[in-house]
Image (spheres, rainbow, N blue to C red):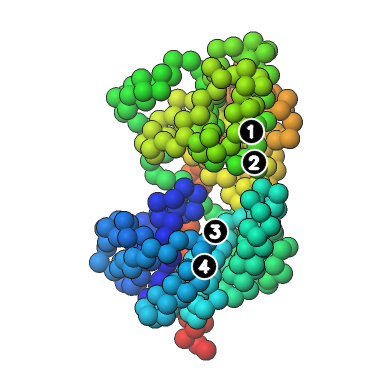
Amino acid sequence: MRIAIDARKLHDYGIGTYVRNLLRHLARQDRESEYVVICRPAHTSSVLQLGENFRAVPTRTPSYSVSEQFVIPAIVGREKPDLFHTPHYVLPPLTRCPSVVTIHDCIHLMFPQYLPNRFAYAYARTFMSAAAHRSARILTVSETSKRDILRFFAVPDDKVTVIPNAIDERFGTAPTEDEVRRVRERYQLSDEFVLYTGNIKPHKNVDRLIEAFHQLREEGFGHLRLLIIGDEISTHPSLRRAVHRWKLHKHVRFLGFVPDQTLAVLYRLAAVFVFPSLYEGFGLPPLEAMASGTPVVTSNVSSLPEVVGDAAVLIDPLDPAAIASGIRQVLTDPALRARLVARGLDRARAFSWEASVRQVRVIYGQVAAERHAD
């Protein structure tokens, strides 16, 4: 079987995590199929390291562009795979090969007010709908996302398969003492801190987290710090204003993106991980924190309760006082903290990229068999 995969987001955050683990575990599990990996020129060597049955096809065409509507179908047409897998919601109409599409969430349709303009909303709606209807199968990462896809696009229930994300192996491995020491020294982490990681787009609700942090400090947690890892704050001036409104500029630190190894250490050093997002297709960071042995406070909405189960403190993300209360419980109740750590480790082990990619391969086989049966 020959399978083409659009891996242009290989080293991105978010979807990039999905693509990296998909390819890594396909390489471990399948030495028989031929994989044609469409990638950025700079990522060719990464693809070739996967194995002899992986072949890189580099292209400079950007994601979410006009040019990809022609370039990607041309590559697929030339390579003549049995199926094509696009790991995001764009499936160019000129693609004639049976296709599998992964739609991670419907965030653009749920919160159109966060998009830059009406054109962006029309683009997302048009291409998500086209991908949902033209693909042979739709993969998604949670039951919540499946319900959203069925509601927005009215496709048959059995066309959509839920295959959850999982965590990278590095989060299950304890860092060395030297690694911990280097991270502490580099970021001057002498005080107890609350950690958030992820992008800081409006639906991530970081402004209310900052307000909740202010409330905690007012209640006597003056030693506490808040570390926010993700986008540079310069791209979201409203958060800078929130920090200054509560006079927290000495106590809230925006670190931007950090290397994966550093992130793994920061998870383990945090007193509590807080993720008050308003909407997630899956919500991987809480699971990563759990695998690192860190107690989690997260939202009681969207897919997050589905992902964390009974292993986190669930809060109303619209209420800063509720966010503050959840953090306070973890910081002041040792028995609760111990339960969350134990349950979190168990919960994280329930998610496996090996098992998830095995399910993806079953879908590949079904789509290829249907093609040859026609």
Query: Residue 223, how many percent across, how many down?
Result: 55, 12
Mark toward the start of the polypeptide (4 vs 3) = 4
> Which residue was labeled with disc 3?
163
Query: Residue 95, how many percent across, how many down?
Result: 50, 77
**Dot 3: what SS?**
loop
Give amino acid for label 1.
Ser
> Which residue was labeled with disc 1?
238
Between the C-alphas of marks 2 and 4, the distance is: 27 Å
Mark toward the start of the polypeptide (2 vs 1) = 2
Mark toward the start of the polypeptide (2 vs 4) = 4
**Dot 1: what SS?**
helix
Between the C-alphas of marks 4 and 1, the distance is: 32 Å
Mark toward the start of the polypeptide (2 vs 3) = 3
Using residue 28 as the reference point, say whether residue 246 is left or right of it: right
Q: How many other residues sit within 10 Å of disc 2, few (<14), some (14-19) or many (≥20)?
A: some
Identify the residue shown where x is 55% and y is 76%. Answer: 93
Nearest to the eye among marks 4 and 3: give it. Answer: 4
> Which residue was labeled with disc 2?
202
Residue 66, label in figure: 4
Image quarter for residue 172? Answer: top left
Q: Are marks 2 and 1 in contact (CB under 8 Å)?
A: yes
> Which of 37/117 is in front?
117
Identify the residue shown where x is 68% and y is 72%. Answer: 156
Identify the residue shown where x is 44% and y is 71%. Answer: 72
Give amino acid for label 3.
Ile
Between the C-alphas of marks 1 and 3, the distance is: 35 Å
